Image: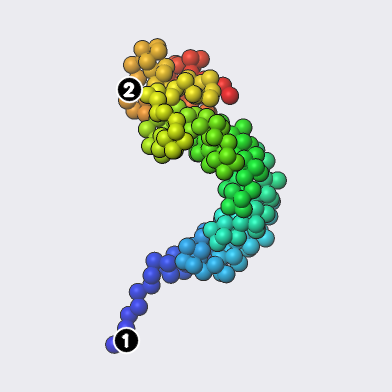
Amino acid sequence: MGIITIPSSFQNQLELLNDTIKENPENYQLWIRKGNILSRNHKNDEAAVCFNKAISITSNNPEVWDAKGNFLAAQGKFSEALDCFNKMIILAPSEPRAYDLKGGVLEKLNKYQEALECYQKVFELNPQSVTTYINLVEVYNQLNNKDKAVQYYKHYLALIPESTYAKDRLLELNEPIEDDYKQYRPFSYIFPEDFHKKFGLDLPPILYSLLQYAFFSSNPITYYNLTIGCELFPWVFFVK
């Protein structure tokens, strides 16, 4: 009786994906998925073929440049990744993620002023992106701009008051820790807990949780629709 070899999870995934690709060879998302699986299993040459195939199918889709750029960045090929993210920006100039990814590789290339410009663009396009505050702080630290770094740490704590990371960094900069950072909120919108208290609203816990989720997930449309449903509008609004 011969030895029975049980295929690994990787082999199973690849076999199933290959069968699907045979049926849908022009589906670029399948090629990206295959490339990601191969990359995670250190088969980078084969993965590169998949990402290039996805690009050949739809080179005007920013998603393919996003995928290839991340693949290259994970290998430390930051200059090549930068080319991909630049193409992504050309195709999707109003997409915050494109500038965020570009900023990340620029940091790796020690081009901090250019990275700063990218993160400022993210901030302009999506001012509710809390991770952008940390990115800005890190760049300002590299540029030896302590005042700006402190400012954005405080903005971050206004949004995420439980962040020990931001508090630890402030202590490293010899800045005292405050009890309440709400005064540093950089925008004039009303937070869920604010209108809950200000207007004495008795919201069901699940609805309150949904409002908090929509607010912090940077989704103003969902947030707006929920406020309409709660009859809270126009008390609750987003203003840049």
Rendered view: 103 above or below 74: above
Q: Which residue is mark 2?
A: 204
Q: Which residue is mark 1?
A: 2
Image quadrant where one finds the N terminus: bottom left
Q: Residue 107: give x, y in percent of width and height.
A: 59, 48
Residue occupying the point 64% across, 48% down: 111
Residue neighbourhood size for the residue with mark 2, other residues' Cα within 10 Å, grouped as few (<14), some (14–19), many (≥20): few
Q: Is residue 204 left or right of residue 26?
A: left
Residue occupying the point 40% across, 28% down: 177
Q: Residue furthest right?
A: 90
Residue occupying the point 38% across, 72% down: 7
Q: Give the camera-side residue of 102 and 224.
A: 102
Q: Residue 191: give x, y in percent of width and height.
A: 45, 22
Q: Residue furthest left?
A: 1
Rendered view: 227 above or below 214: above
Q: Give the camera-side residue of 75 and 18.
A: 75
